[in-house]
Structures are given as structure tokens and as C-alpha cells.
């Protein structure tokens, strides 16, 4: 999938990742912390740490290797 297609999946609440990423179990999801906050992307890295405010690189935006991740992970 490309980023345009995967953005719809993020908005629907799915976790997504690129096949080209090195880190096992690394993925991105979208969340809203409170009703006062706007939604943001969160990167869950290979070490199991969550980083709010992830911004896709140009390479990520142009990539065609995006996919949906199974639901076996806990969000922060």
C-alpha cells in the first residue's frame, strides 16, 4: 500500500508499518490523548517505546510497502 491508502487505515484506528523498516514489532498508530487534543501519529519503536508526534519522512510518504499490523500490541 502507499501512504495515501494507509492514511485511511490510520484514521480507522489500525496500526500500520512498512516492510522496509528494520525494527521488529515497530509500527505507527493515530490517537487523541484527550478531547482537547488534536489527533497525532505515534511511533512504537522496536524497543517497545512509544513516541508521540511521529512525522513521516519523504521516503515514508513515497513508499509502496505499507501494510496493516495485527492487533497484538498495547498502545501507550
Image (cartoon, helix red, strand yellow):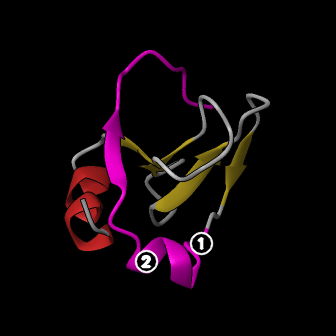
Question: Circle 2 is placed at which residue position?
Answer: 61
Q: Quadrant of the C terminus?
A: top right
Height in image: 42 above or below 14? below
Q: Earlier in the sequence, mark 1 or mark 2?
A: 1
- Neighbour tally class for label 2: few under 14, some 14-19, many 20 plus, Cα within 10 Å: some
The reply to whether dot 1 and dot 2 touch (C-beta < 8 Å) is: no
Residue 50 at x, y percent in the picture: 70, 41
Determine the residue located farthest toward the bottom in the rendered image.
Answer: 58
Question: Circle 1 is placed at which residue position?
Answer: 55
Residue at the image position 46 percent from the left and 66 percent from the top? 38
Residue range corresponding to the magenta coloring: 55-76
Residue 41 at x, y percent in the picture: 52, 59
Height in image: 2 above or below 22? below
Image position of 47 (left or right of 6): right
Residue at the image position 64 percent from the left and 64 percent from the top? 53
Residue 74 at x, y percent in the picture: 54, 21
Image position of 74 (left or right of 6): right
Q: Secondary structure at mark 2?
A: helix
Amino acid at each position: 500500500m502507499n501512504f495515501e491508502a494507509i492514511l485511511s487505515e490510520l484514521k480507522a484506528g489500525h496500526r500500520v508499518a512498512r516492510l522496509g523498516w528494520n525494527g521488529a514489532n515497530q509500527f505507527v498508530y493515530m490517537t487523541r490523548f484527550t478531547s482537547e487534543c488534536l489527533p497525532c501519529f505515534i511511533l512504537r519503536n522496536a524497543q517497545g517505546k512509544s513516541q508521540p508526534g511521529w512525522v513521516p519522512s519523504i521516503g515514508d510518504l513515497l513508499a509502496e510497502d505499507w501494510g496493516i499490523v495485527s492487533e497484538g500490541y498495547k498502545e501507550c
